[in-house]
Image (cartoon, rainbow, N blue to C red):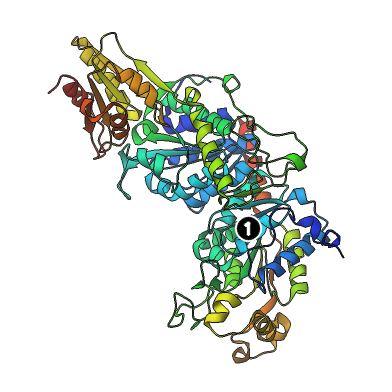
């Protein structure tokens, strides 16, 4: 594909297609709608299915249904719709059905400011659905990264049989940048691990070699049961503690044992840096610029850009923060990921820069904090 | 006859999931056996059937049946079924729901699945109450009916499930009761065979909650009431509006030929190809 000017939202659409997505169900909502528009045009060209559902609840339900039927599936939304999707994020986690949920964050709470940027859904992405469950959330900082992380989101989702949340913000979603997308056949695609055991031996939730059981698609000759109730290895509802406990342990283990694969971050820490800025999404763009300016003024400042925000990269942050005196966390919210940083490195080291009015945290604000004003 | 010899045996999952959760005398099992008879008569392969349910007493049906089965969230069976059908058009996708599940919390999906004429067989077991949670009034509880949340009598008029589906755009709509099991076999057979959105309302009862709260007697008494209070469409036409009031009208209320969603979606695929080739 020739280099072209493209929106982050559009890049998400292309990333989905490159990853092998063949199903999209969604409901219009600013600032994510371009993803649906783009896929309504492109999916039918390759025989894929696009459907505009009656609400966001139905949208994620349809995605899970299609994924059980064997198609890689995605939906996209923003704050209010993301709130409506929470029950089905839990359902996908419980039933271990791969799907990708894109949330282009806008200012909340409630209807808030549909066209203003925010990073206010960070904690909702982690804990929005009820009950303890593992989740993966990725957050791109640029248009080309929106493409890359969409592919990664699909790959993680299939590899670990889990819903994956792609957290954009209005800035990255609507921003246009020059991008040179790779040929789709050069993109690494992870396909669902299926099964070839005789159907009477198939245990949909049991006996995995890893902690991720092979998934048979509906209609492929393996008849089994899927339920949001706690279930045994056959997928049948259970109230037995000796079946519930292993389930809870396994689904968390399948993420925790693979943190090396799942945690993605960019580290730019010069020798002797005592101040480190940790950021993600659009705020990371301001952070990068502020760090550049600070270094021109001979401040030794490190920069960490988190691409994976859930699971939170605790070990990496602990290691990096060990030598630092001060950690600055700029966010377009009142301090959500900051809580995680504080949990890992302690509150004393952490300086917050928060903005929750729809405006970006500016490089100047971060620079001032670096210089200790 | 051993249980293995029973004609329904091959369609059930006997090893793990019985006995079932339903109260003795419940009508849901009758709908389940009618569904098995319809599928058996149509000689469909078990691998080619997907049974999708929501939450509630009726929502528990799929776990007992040896198909591709998915027990989803409350009200959303049709939305899950829509995705599954689009992904695997070859599957016969059957959504089995209760009244609260389909037309209260799931009302939006019910209307829009019918409007799209989505190729799904929808079965609503209407027992006029939320049974699993202990007898709260539902969108089909009759006026003045007592429920645990309408102790002074229900003031909300019941939802005409079939009429809503017809108005919204379904291809096939039929209503019967769990007393008229043979009739229901036939309607289910027709609904499963046809493309587009096909609805069968199976009027049932809940003697455990609604029956007890309204002093309607045993399961047997309530079953008899379905017989006494229902009329076929042909018989209903001969009644005056006064005589017809309060009667359950049974029959194929609606049956039209029109393309289902998947047939229409083929047009989208074809037009997309034309756009590619026009370049």
Q: Position of residue B104 (x, y in %)?
A: 50, 65
Compared across the picture, whether B121 is left or right of A26 comes to right
Q: Which residue is mark 1?
A: B117
Foreground of the two, A129 or A181: A129
Q: Is residue B119 visible?
A: no
**Relative to residue A316, is residue B162 depicted above or below?**
below
Tell me the crowding category of disc 1: few under 14, some 14 to 19, or many 20 or more residues within 10 angstroms, Cα based. many
In the orientation shown, which residue stands out farthest toward the left?
Answer: A373
Chain letter for the residue marked with disc 1 in the picture: B
> Which residue lies most toward the front here?
A242
Residue A207: image x %, image y %? 66, 36
Residue name at image x 58 percent, y 34 percent: A21
Q: Nearer the viewer, residue A294 or B172?
A: A294
Under tag 1, what secondary structure?
Answer: loop
Q: Is B237 or A69 nearer to us in this picture?
A: A69
Figure quadrant of the C terminus of chain A: top left
Which image quadrant is residue A114 in?
top left
Who is closer to the viewer here, A203 or A142? Answer: A203
Please report the residue visible at 73 percent of the width from the left and 41 percent of the height from the top: A220
* Image vertical order of residue A193 relative to residue B148, above or below: above
């Amino acid at each position: 594909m020739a280099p072209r000017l493209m929106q982050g939202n559009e890049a998400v659409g292309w990333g989905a297609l490159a990853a092998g997505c063949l199903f999209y169900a969604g409901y219009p909502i600013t600032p994510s709608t371009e993803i649906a528009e783009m896929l309504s045009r492109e999916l039918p060209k390759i025989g894929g299915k696009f459907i505009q559902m009656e609400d966001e609840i139905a949208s994620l339900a349809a995605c899970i249904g299609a994924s059980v039927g064997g198609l890689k599936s995605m939906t996209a939304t923003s704050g209010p719709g993301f709130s409506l999707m929470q029950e089905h994020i839990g359902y996908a986690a419980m039933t271990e059905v791969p799907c990708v949920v894109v949330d282009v964050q806008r200012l909340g709470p409630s209807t808030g400011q549909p066209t203003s940027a925010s990073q206010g859904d960070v904690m909702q992405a982690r804990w929005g659905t009820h009950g303890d469950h593992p989740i993966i959330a990725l957050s791109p900082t640029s248009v080309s990264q929106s493409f890359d992380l969409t592919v990664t989101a699909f790959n993680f989702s299939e590899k670990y049989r889990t819903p994956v949340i792609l957290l954009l913000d209005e800035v990255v979603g609507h921003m246009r940048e020059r991008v040179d997308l790779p040929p789709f056949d050069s993109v690494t695609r992870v396909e669902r691990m299926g099964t070839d055991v005789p159907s009477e031996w198939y245990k949909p939730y049991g006996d995995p070699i890893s902690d991720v059981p092979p998934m048979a698609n509906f209609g492929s000759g393996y008849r089994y049961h899927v339920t949001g109730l706690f279930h045994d290895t056959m997928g049948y509802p259970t109230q037995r503690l000796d079946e519930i406990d292993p389930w809870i342990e396994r689904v968390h283990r399948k993420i925790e044992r693979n943190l090396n694969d799942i945690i993605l971050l960019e580290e730019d820490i010069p020798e002797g840096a005592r101040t480190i800025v940790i950021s993600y999404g659009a705020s990371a763009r301001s952070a990068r610029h502020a760090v550049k300016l600070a270094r021109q003024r001979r401040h030794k400042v490190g920069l960490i850009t988190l691409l994976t925000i859930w699971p939170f990269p605790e070990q990496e942050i602990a290691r990096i923060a060990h030598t630092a005196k001060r950690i600055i966390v700029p966010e377009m919210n009142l301090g959500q990921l900051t809580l995680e940083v504080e949990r890992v490195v302690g509150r004393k080291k952490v300086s917050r820069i928060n903005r929750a009015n729809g405006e970006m945290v500016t490089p100047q604000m971060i620079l001032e904090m670096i210089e200790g004003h | 006859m051993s249980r293995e010899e029973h004609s329904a045996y091959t369609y059930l999952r006997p090893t793990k999931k019985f006995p079932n959760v339903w109260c003795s005398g419940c009508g849901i099992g009758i709908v389940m056996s009618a569904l098995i008879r319809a599928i058996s008569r149509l000689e469909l392969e078990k691998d080619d059937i997907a049974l999708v349910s929501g939450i509630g007493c009726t929502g528990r049906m799929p776990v007992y049946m040896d198909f591709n089965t998915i027990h989803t969230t409350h009200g959303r069976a049709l939305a899950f079924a829509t995705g599954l059908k689009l992904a695997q058009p070859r599957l016969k996708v059957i959504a089995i729901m209760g009244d609260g599940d389909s037309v209260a919390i799931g009302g939006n999906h019910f209307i829009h699945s019918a409007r799209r004429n989505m190729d799904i067989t929808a079965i609503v077991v209407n027992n006029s109450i939320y049974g699993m949670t202990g007898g709260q009034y539902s969108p089909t509880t009759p006026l003045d009916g007592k429920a645990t949340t309408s102790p002074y009598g229900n003031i909300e008029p019941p939802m005409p499930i079939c009429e809503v589906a017809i108005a919204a755009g379904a291809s096939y709509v039929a209503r019967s009761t769990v007393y008229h099991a043979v009739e229901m076999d036939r309607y289910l057979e027709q609904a499963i065979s046809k493309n587009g959105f096909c609805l069968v309302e199976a009027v049932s009862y809940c003697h455990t909650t609604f029956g007890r709260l309204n002093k309607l007697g045993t399961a047997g008494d309530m079953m008899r009431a379905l017989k006494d209070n229902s009329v076929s469409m042909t018989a209903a036409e001969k009644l005056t509006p006064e005589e017809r009031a309060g009667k359950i009208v049974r029959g194929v209320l609606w049956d039209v030929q029109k393309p289902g969603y998947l047939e229409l979606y083929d047009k989208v695929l074809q037009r997309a190809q034309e756009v590619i080739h026009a370049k």
